[in-house]
Image: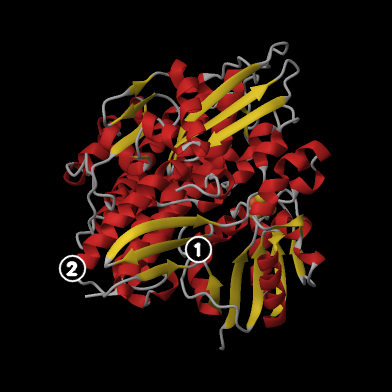
Amino acid sequence: MHKGNFNISLKNISKIEGHTHMDIAVKNNEAVSVKLKISENKRFYRDAVKGMGYKAAPMHLARICGTCSPAHMSCVCEAVERAMNIRISEQSRALRELLLLGNIIRDHGMHLYFFCLPDIFGVDSVLDFDKKKDNLIHNALHVKEAGNMLCNAVGGRAVHPPFANVGGFNELPSKENVREALKELKEARQYALDFIDTFFVKDMSFKRDTNFVALCGKGFSYIDGVIKTSSGKVIEEEDYREHLEKVIIPYSNASAFEFEFKEFMVGALARLNLNKDELEKSTRKDCSRYLKVFPSNDIFHNNLAQAISVVNAIDKSVKMLESMDFKKEKIPEAKLGKANVGVGVIEAPRGTLYHMIGVDAKGIVNRSEVIIPTSQNVIHLEKSMVDFVNAMLSKGISKEKISMNVERLIRAYDPCMSCATHFLKINWK
Amino acid sequence: MQKKKLGIFSFTCCEGCTVVFIELLNNHFFDYKNRFDFVSFRQLKSNNKTGKMDFAIIEGAISTASEKKKLLEIRKKAKKIIAIGSCACTGAPSNQRNNFRPEIKKEIEKQVKALRQLKTIEPLKKYVKVDILLNGCPVNITQLEKAMEGL
Ligand code: SF4
């Protein structure tokens, strides 16, 4: 048993996106506070984008985060389009969906295979696996590459995709790239399926009563739908604006936050909990054994949910690519002359992402707000951590082991601190 | 053959260039693993050290005194520094606040102080000698692949 008071301080937490530290204070053998600390690398994108033309906003704001840039890009495009009354075509909508599916495969892939897999096999790094695991790594890389190729084909690049734009895509995927991506995706499917069992871990569990929140759409869309919560709320498209304002305010006022939502959680687990019936039929069939787990309030099931989502993203993108014949279209122009505000809402790999863009009558950006998934999860994460640590303290688990498990739980949340550096206030609790 | 010691470091940026490196691993994982001993790679391992190394691949611009200190330390320990991406090579786009209009600079002044950032955000070459510059936002994957062949 530990006696008295001590601190657990995790510096430069590795195998997550971005830089962060965590401090846990233990008094009389009880965790009294947990703080996830953000680093100092803020880059002031919201201020920088003011004064720019509306067309420049998406590629600029996407530089918030290299990991999920296709998500930021698509979300800002949607916000600008809503602000400027631009209707995008069905084909553009499909391309946007495909870009996000590719991003889901490569981003969940990176998190699962590079960040979490070492935890499962008890090594520090994916670089430390011995020869016996070469096959497993080979399969993992194959799945990741399939996502990468899908992003390359549709977006022109996986990081900061140049084809995606306000109003649609300024270049269409070439036949050859589509063919190659399809081949890679089909080959990767079995690997992605086999990995699900690997991430159905039984040695770690942390259950917490949770209000899950996700944009839930038909066909498990990452761009269209309504916001649902496990407490039973449904927020329609036209109310996003009001909803968004309410979620933004909390950053300067903690009580407002509690009032609107109480702590909640977004991400792959939330999506499966709220919308698993909309997964592809083939995914539902082949993952049925694991899908029974959902809805689940075990945070470690976020990894399982990601592994299933990878299979679904493969199934859905294959189906879409096989049925589509891309045709050159004119990108619709904006109508200038009226100041307005638009809100984009999409599901990024780590959860619901909101961008709000204000434009003046000339189409110059005069306002930009963004809520990233990690900032929505952070209160939940900190509160969970207190309970998680206390449960371990009461079992007399060593400080070293506690630190290790704490890191595993942080990774299960899949936080993205590259995004978070920008939008968390410095002194939140 | 002795493995070359390689460190991957990330300063103020979106980390997109490291993501490009991680995508490069899809096809080069075993090759790089055989050729290099990764002494530092925060995204992939804990226990990261800034010890003696043959190469340091660095993304991001320098925004705080602690980043500057770390960069100087890397320069002392690394035989070659490879700057990847425009943040590391030119400062942009991470350095955009350097060029904000005076009113906006005033607005963000408090935050800059609270975050303990330096007056301006600068590329690596402002503080140290950089041996190879691979520009682009993000770094061009083919150029990075080529540069890796030569290390
Ligand atoms: S150069 Fe571009 S992609 Fe690379 S880290 Fe900087 S902002 Fe991100």
Q: Amino acid at mark 2?
A: Lys
Q: Which mark is residue A64?
A: none
Quadrant of res A217: top left
Camera-side residue: A199 or A367? Answer: A367
Label 1 crowd (10 A; few <14 / some 14-19 / many >=20): many
> What residue is rendered at 69% in x and 47% in y?
B110
Colour setup of the view: secondary structure
**Tag 2 residue:** A395
Number of numbered callouts drawn: 2
Q: Is mark 2 within 8 Å of ligand 1?
A: no
> What residue is rendered at 37% in x and 30% in y?
A259
Using residue A11 as the reference point, say whether residue A166 is left or right of it: right
Would residue A17 be seen by someone viewing this image from the given angle? no
Residue A107 image position (x, y, % from top left): 46, 49
Q: Is A267 located above or below residue B67 in the figure?
A: above
Q: Secondary structure at mark 2?
A: loop
Q: Is mark 1 within 8 Å of ligand 1?
A: no
Using residue A1 as the reference point, say whether residue A403 is left or right of it: right
Residue B91 image position (x, y, % from top left): 76, 55
Q: Which mark is residue B43?
A: 1
